[in-house]
Image (cartoon, rainbow, N blue to C red):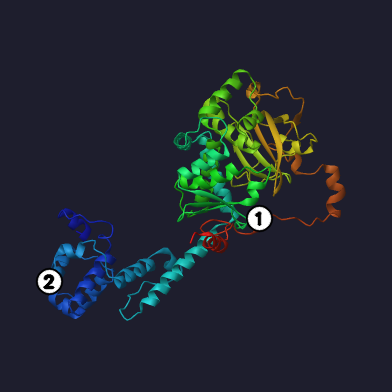
Amino acid sequence: MTRKDAVAAAGVALDDEDMDAFTIGRRIRQIRTGRGMTLDDLAAAVGRAPSQLSMIENGRREPKLSLLRTIARALGTSLDALLESEELDPRAALEIEVARAMTGPTFRSAGVTPFRIPRAVPDEVLRALLALQGEIERLHDERAATPEEARRANVALRRLMRTQNNYFPELEQQARELLAAVGHPGGPLTQRTASDIAGHLGFSIHYVADLPQTTRSVADLAHGRLYLSSRLAAATPADPRTAVLQALSSRILGHTEPASYDEFLRQRVETNYLTGALLIPEADAVPALREAKERRAISIEDLRDAYSVSYETAAHRFTNLATEHLGIAVHFLKVHESGTITKAYENDDVDFPTDRLGAIEGQLCCREWTSRAVFDVDDRFNPYYQYTDTGNGTYWCTARVEHSSEGAHSVSVGVRFDDTKWFLGRDTPHRGVSRHSVDVCCRRAPAGLEERWRAAAWPNVKTPRTLLATLPTGAFPGVDTTDLYAFLEAHAPS
């Protein structure tokens, strides 16, 4: 019977620390040295070899309950004293941490065989070993943060969103409770209401000219201050409400420093979702959308205008509510002017291009789809509608082009042909045919052009930076923490 089983049979409750052979061994050593006993003295008192007790004290052997009782009597203490969860002295705690590290995967992968830690080894050496272990693990995490990891994380998250029809009731509930707490009467969320939400959460808003360039906002949790760029407040196309709500959403959701890219990505999705739920409240938007469906006049533009948000925000929010409340399956695409897909969602079985991992982001969008065709339309005032015949059926989409610091992007929302009857723009004459799901379609140049130019062309490829580089690393990927902490230090109230 092991010590763990015997103690359990005796009715003694042990927590995780008590069950640790390292902790038991260091506690024996701590009491022994406190009594002024040598290892040989204790070995003689319990009738065991010094080498055997040394292995117990170093956590390399788990003692039986009978031996523990004998050791306790020899030390003039009780069994409970050996098993209690009272904190060890700093040196013992440090030795346990190093001993645990030596049995972990980092030391094993480096070929380090666990060894006894003599008392003569200075504390600084043990701390250096732990620091080296931490740095090795950080480098392993950095090496793992590749574009492939990002694609895998995107695939997993998109599958979750598809399973839930991109509807997260717990986030909707949090939005309702927060809006009720500040007395929001419904309709568009004003800038003042956004400030009221900040105040309700214990933050004051400050617009500054020197916000770190790698951040959208900075929250000083120690002093309850939320910093935003003064350029954002003065920019006409920007929406200061969105920046405020996105910054506050992480605090509302209780986000902690992300431990992986997957967690970082999930936090961003949750933040954007809650921000959309605050800007376009479910309780107000759903009745309006249902009424529009009855009139067969659903329009993303109308949703955008009713709540004074961007077209992308309205399109995102529509995908949250369409299937859950209207029974309409949808897809969403955001495509850069280069043709690269940057965001995607679908639960209507549309056939997006994917890589071998199933990732959509980073793939080239078919030239015949609405998301690409809209770039060739001169009229940027009115929405563009198009039917596209695919190998998986016919889809109808509405799209617009929006501009940002990263260039022009198209944002489109689409549905199956049978659901087109609920939307404005269903009478569009624009049609396209996409064969990308069954052959190369537009991914390969026409035979005549390829034959003429393939041997005579040599382009200098504009490789996206993130294609070859690892993902940004650190607690918050992409943020220069030196700038961040220096900024907070400079702006903290005296």
User: Where residue 260 appears, x then y in whole percent?
Assistant: 50, 54
Residue position marked by numbered label 1 in the rendering: 467
Q: Which amino acid does label 2 sit on?
A: Gly
Please determine whether, in this image, residue 233 is positioned above or below residue 146: above
Do labels 2 and 1 touch, CB within 8 Å? no
Q: In this view, does 399 lie to the left or right of 448?
A: left
Q: Is residue 443 left or right of residue 312?
A: right
Please determine whether, in this image, residue 17 is positioned above or below residue 453: below
Q: Is residue 446 left or right of residue 232?
A: right
**Outermost residue to the front:** 494
User: Where residue 283 appears, x then y in whole percent?
Assistant: 50, 28
Numbered circles on residues, count: 2
- Give the Cα separation between the discs numbered 2 and 1: 66 Å
Q: What residue type is labelled 1?
A: Leu
User: Where residue 259 appears, x then y in whole percent?
Assistant: 47, 55
Residue position marked by numbered label 2 in the rendering: 76
Q: Can residue 244 be seen in this view?
A: yes
Please determine whether, in this image, residue 470 is positioned above or below residue 202: below
Answer with the quarter of the image where residue 240 lies: top right
Tell me the quarter of the image containing the N terminus: bottom left
Please determine whether, in this image, residue 267 is positioned above or below residue 466: above
Mark 2 falls on what kind of element?
A: loop
Q: Which of 450/407 is in front? A: 407
Q: Which of marks 2 and 1 is in front?
A: 2
Mark 1 falls on what kind of element?
A: helix
Q: Which of 333/193 is in front? A: 193
